[in-house]
Amino acid sequence: MQLKNLNPSFGKKQFQDLKSNMNWFKKVIAFITPLSYVEVRTRNSKGRYIADDPTTIQNEAYKKVLRKKTKSSKIK
C-alpha cells in the first residue's frame, strides 16, 4: 500500500493516525511470530571473531542462539 498517493483531501492528522495504526499492527505480528535457533558467529570479550579449532569435533566458531529469523534482502 502506497501512502504517498492518497487523496488530497486526506489530511495530515488522518495520515499520521493511519501510519501509527499500521505500526501497532506490525508490533503485534512481531510479538506473535515464534522464535527459532539461529547460528551466529562467536565473539570473544574484545568483540573479535573466534576461529574454529580443527582438532576438535565441535565447531567453536558458531553457536546457536534463540532469535527471530531475519529476512534476507535481495539486491536487484
Image (cartoon, rainbow, N blue to C red):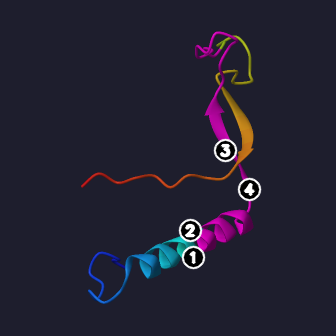
| Label 3: few (<14), some (14–19) or many (≥20) C-alpha neighbours in 10 Å | some
Judging by the rendered image, the residue that carries numbered circle 1 is 21
Judging by the rendered image, the residue that carries numbered circle 4 is 35
Count of numbered marks: 4
Is 53 above or below relative to 5?
Answer: above
Is 61 above or below relative to 2?
Answer: above
The answer for how far apart the CA atoms under marks 1 and 4 are is 24 Å
Image quadrant in which you'd find residue 48: top right
The region drawn magenta spans 24-52
CB within 8 Å, label 3 to label 2: no
Quadrant location of the C terminus? bottom left
Q: Residue at x 63, y 34 (%)?
A: 40
Question: Observer-nearest residue: 39 or 35?
Answer: 35
Quadrant location of the N terminus? bottom left
User: Residue 2: which numbered mark, if any?
Assistant: none
Judging by the rendered image, the residue that carries numbered circle 3 is 38
CB within 8 Å, label 2 to label 1: yes
Q: Name which residue type carries label 1.
A: Asn
Q: Which residue is drawn at 37% across and 82% down?
A: 11
Percent of width and height locating residue 39: 65, 38
The answer for how far apart the CA atoms under marks 4 and 2 are is 20 Å
Q: Name which residue type carries label 4.
A: Leu
Q: Name which residue type carries label 2.
A: Asn
The answer for how far apart the CA atoms under marks 3 and 2 are is 26 Å
Question: Observer-nearest residue: 45 or 10?
Answer: 10
Q: Is mark 1 on a helix, strand or loop?
A: helix
